Image (tube, rainbow, N blue to C red):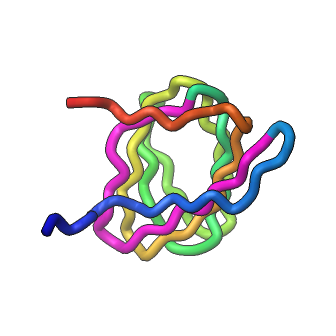
Amino acid sequence: METINRPEMLLLEKGENFKILQVRAKAGMVMPQHHTTEEAVICVQEGEALLKMADGDHLMKKGVAKIIGAGEDHTLEVNKDFKAIVTMALHSEIEFQVK
């Protein structure tokens, strides 16, 4: 049986225009390269992770918020157990790079 080593994403709520996801991850987990089809806002509730984007690395820790543009490829490397809220358009999709 394969062990999952990726962050967990849970849909918290859907409205007419937006959806809210919760991202949870243990230290050492990695969310592989992906992007959203529309802008997304990530707000960190606890823990620490490195958000790797084309414009550089961003330290994501409690209280930090970041807008990620549509189609911007990025990865998330979790340093300390991590929890964040992600808000995006209702019809936005998360697309992972296929290797």
Q: Nearer the viewer, residue 62 or 40?
A: 40
Q: Residue furthest right?
A: 16
On screen, 70 above or below 75?
Answer: above
Residue at image location 32% in from the left, 31% down from the top: 97
Query: Within the magenta stretch, is there residue 20?
Result: yes
Instruction: Report the side of 88 relative to 8 (left or right).
Output: right
The number of numbered badges drawn on the structure is 0
Give the residues drawn in magenta, as a range. Answer: 18-36
Residue at image location 37% in from the left, 51% down from the top: 31
Q: Nearer the viewer, residue 51 or 91?
A: 91
Please provide percent x and percent y for residue 33: 35, 38
Please provide percent x and percent y for residue 50: 42, 54
On screen, 98 above or below 19?
Answer: above
Instruction: Report the side of 6 relative to 62 (left or right).
Output: left
Please provide percent x and percent y for residue 26: 38, 73
On screen, 44 above or below 35?
Answer: below
Instruction: Report the side of 44 relative to 77 (left or right).
Output: right
Please provide percent x and percent y for residue 51: 45, 48
Q: Main secondary structure of the magenta part?
A: strand
